[in-house]
Image (cartoon, coloured by chain):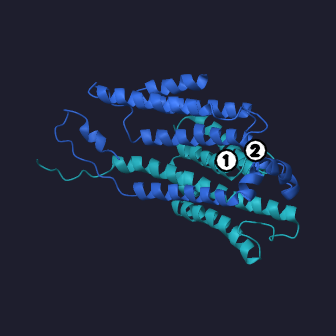
Chain colours: A blue, B cyan
Amino acid sequence: MFLVVVAVAIVRARDLFAAAMLFAIYSLLSAALFVVLDAGDVALTEAAVGAGISTILMLAVLALARRYEHPDHGHNRGHKGVALAVVIVTGAVLVYATLDMPEFGSPDNPAQVHVGPYYTEQSYPDMGVPNMVAAVLASYRSIDTLGEGFVILTAGLAVFALLSIKPTRRRRKHPGEDNDDEEQRP
Amino acid sequence: MRDNGILRIVARFLIPLIMLFGLYIQFHGEYSPGGGFQAGVVFAAGWILFVLIYGLDAALKVIPERAMFILMLLGVLLYCAVGVANVILGGHFLDFYTLLPSPHAAQQFGIITVEFGIGVTVATVVMLIFTMFARRKSEWDEAPYEAEEDD
């Protein structure tokens, strides 16, 4: 419930600084939700990455960009109608799809009958590691985790490639007329 | 922010604790929630707090940018090396069983090593991204103007 309120507040916020902080609150609330669902690893990740690092990075970007979003001049009303229709249709399809999902927590849904029981029963006898999440991530699914490592590495290299070029800025042609040159900021 | 006494004192107290907590969830990951990703991010968060209080230059003296590059590559390479070592010893890629005689010990050794590689990579990548953005600001402030065009 809180999540919905915060999400609406993020969409409404024109002040990007406030939006960044609201994103942090949203992540923290999700982390609390994961704790309630007894998913400690996911909660820890959400709190550290979502509420911590991504907020800091957004603030670092805000130091480069302008603080306020463009005001809406109302010249794209038509697009808004189309966008609203697309969102409503997509949402309706997704809600319709959830009707086909197995009952929440039912013992015979696919998540509980495929490889799940093997991991639950065998991970401790196999490797003597009490935290099943670590056992699945680093041993049973270690090649997936290797892939994630490469994703992180690629992200770092991509940011370096984009931001290591020295910036140049456009000279303001008509001083005081508008702030168009601000948009040239990287 | 740098002249604020309260912030300096509190940060001086908190940074070691944050980094220690990062190491704790790194190496205690098989017994309690945690692992390489979370540990790397928490460790990097401690370093970013250091940047915010003491400035980027001081922080880059502790961990230079070149070291970040080398460490982020070494992290992934360590992960791959564990897998390849297994192949050389006659097992499957990332199977861990051939590393040590006892299967439990081998699995735990493999998991800890692999998670450590992930942790190092995540921590240094986050630090590197933050460094790039933080330095962009100062570069932008001193950036030369482009030649003026007439239209």
Report helix, strand or loop for mark 2. Answer: loop
Q: Earlier in the sequence, mark 1 or mark 2?
A: 2
Q: How many numbered marks are there?
A: 2
In percent of width and height, residue A130 lies at 84, 49
Chain bearing tag 2 is B
Above or below for A99 versus A155? above
Chain bearing tag 1 is B
Q: Which residue was labeled with disc 1?
A: B38
Residue at (77% x, 76% y) in the render: B90
Q: Is residue B151 left or right of residue A49?
A: left
Which residue, as the protein is rendered here, is positioned at the far front? A100
Above or below for A50 versus B134? above
Graded by Cα atoms within 10 Å as few (under 14), some (14 to 19) or many (20 or more), the crowding at tag 2 reads many
In percent of width and height, residue A6 lies at 54, 25
In percent of width and height, residue B94 lies at 72, 66
Q: Do marks 1 and 2 share a subunit? A: yes
Q: Is residue A178 left or right of residue B39?
A: left
| Residue B47 visible (yes or no) | yes
Q: Which residue was labeled with disc 2?
A: B33
Q: CA distance from mark 1 to mark 2?
A: 9 Å
User: Between B10 and A7, which is closer to the camera in this rendering?
Assistant: A7
State the image quarter where residue A45 is shown: top right
User: Between B78 and B83, which is closer to the camera in this rendering?
Assistant: B83
Which residue, as the protein is rendered here, is positioned at the far left? B151
User: Between A88 and A57, which is closer to the camera in this rendering?
Assistant: A88
Q: Amino acid at mark 1?
A: Gln
Above or below for B68 versus A177? below
Q: Are marks 1 and 2 in contact (CB under 8 Å)?
A: yes
| Residue B57 visible (yes or no) | no
In percent of width and height, residue B123 lies at 61, 53
